[in-house]
Amino acid sequence: MSTSGGIVIVGGGLAAARTAEQLRRSQFSGAVTIVSDEDHLPYDRPPLSKEVLRSETDDVTLKPAEFYDENDITMLLGAGAKAVDTAARTLTLTDGREIGYDELVIATGLVPKRIPSFPDLAGIHVLRNFNESLALRREAGSARRAVVVGAGFIGCEVAASLRSMGVEVTLVEPQPAPLANVLGQQIGELVARVHRAEGVDVRCGVGVSEVVGTDKVEKVVLADGAEVEADLVVVGIGSTPAVGWLEGSGIALDNGVVCDAQGRSSAPNVWAIGDVASWRDTVGQQVRVEHWSNVADQARVLVPAMLGQDVPQVVSVPYFWSDQYDVKIQCLGEPEADDIVHVVEDDGRKFLAFYERDGVVAGVVGGGMPGKVMKTRAKIANGAPIADVLPKP
C-alpha cells in the first residue's frame, strides 16, 4: 500500500491535465497526483482520427514532462483506477496499489461502444486512444477497402482520413443522414454530400447484420442484404462514460457521474469533470457535455469550489468542431435535430445554417465558414431573435 493524500485526479486526457493546471494556477501547493491506465502523458484526443491516423504527427501530448516536474505533479501511469472507498478516502489501482486522497477528481472520459455480435477477427477497430489510432494507421497503410460503421463525428473523420490515404471507404449509418441525431437530417445531407464528392460510398438508413471472415475481415453484410468487400472495419457508434469502476462505490451514476453545478458528486470529497461528468445546469437539469472546449470552463469552476475560493460565473456557449477533408465543420450553441433549420449559405460544398427554437437562435453550424460561425457567439449567448441573424428580405 502506498499513500498519496492531497488531490488525486483519475484520467489521462484533457480534463485531467486542465484540472492539474488550474490547481497550480490557483496557488494550491499541496500534493497533486494524476492516475492513468495509459502509458502516455495526458494527450489530446481529437487528432487521433485525423492527424495521427494520417501520419502527420505522433505528438499529441498536452503538456511536456517538464510541466509536471516543474509543477510538482506526480504521474502514476500504466495502472488505472479499479475501485474507490469514499469512507476511507482510498483509491485502489488495477496493479493492486492503494492510494489515499483528500479530494478525488474523476476525469476518466469515455469508452467506445462495441458491437457484441461482431466476431473476433483481425481488421476490426474502435478508436478512442492513441494506441488504437496507431494500430488502425498500420493496417490502413496496406488496406484497399474499409467499412466505417457509424457516421457520427468520429466515423466521418475516420472516413475522411482513410479516403485521403487512398483507401476505398463505405460509410454505413442506420439514420437517414450522417450526424442526423446531432445536427438534423438537412445538415447531415450536406455533410454526406461532402463525403460523396470525395468518393466515399455513403449508405444511410441501413445497419450492419454481419461481418464475415476466417481470421481477418473479408466482407460486411448490410441489413438490406448488400455485401461490401472490406479488409478493414472501423466501428464508430458512440461512447459511454467510463464509470464501470465506480459501480458499488455509492457515488450516484446516471449517464455519467451525477454532479451539482460545480462538479461535486454525491459522495463527499469526490468531484467529476469532462466527458464523464453530468453537471446540473442553470435550470436544474443534469447535462453531460462531450465538447473539448467545455473542459476548461468546468475546471475554472470546479477547482475554486474544491479549494474554497470564490467561484467565477462562467458563461459558456458550447462549441465543437470536426475537420473533414478541407471543410472544418463548426457548431456554436446547442442545436437539436428537431429545431427549425435555416440554411443561409450553400455553395455546393461549404455552408452556413442557423437553428431556431422558440423564435430565438439556438445554434449555428458552418462548414468551411469559421468567421461567420464565431461572430454569432454573442447572439446565441443573449438568446437573440432568429430574425437578428437571418438575411434581410
Image: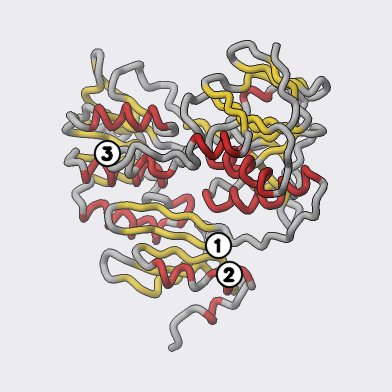
- Where residue 359 sits, quadrant-wise, is bottom right
Between 371 and 173, the one lying in front of the other is 371
Cβ atoms at labels 1 and 2 below 8 Å apart: yes
Q: Is residue 260 above or below residue 269?
A: below
Which secondary structure, mark 2? helix
Which secondary structure, mark 1? strand
Residue depicted at 45% across the width and 87% down the height: 392
Query: Which residue is under mark 1?
Result: 333
> How far separated are the C-alphas under marks 1 and 2?
6 Å
Q: Residue furthest bottom?
A: 393
Between 113 and 101, the one lying in front of the other is 101
Which secondary structure, mark 3? loop
Q: Report whether 139 appears left or right of 14.
A: left
Between 162 and 89, the one lying in front of the other is 89
Q: Is residue 355 above or below residue 220?
A: below
Residue depicted at 77% across the width and 26% down the height: 250
Query: Which residue is under mark 3?
Result: 55
Disc nearest the viewer among 3 and 2: 3
Cβ atoms at labels 3 and 2 below 8 Å apart: no
Q: Which mark is residue 380?
A: 2
Q: Residue 19 in the image: x percent, y percent?
A: 64, 42
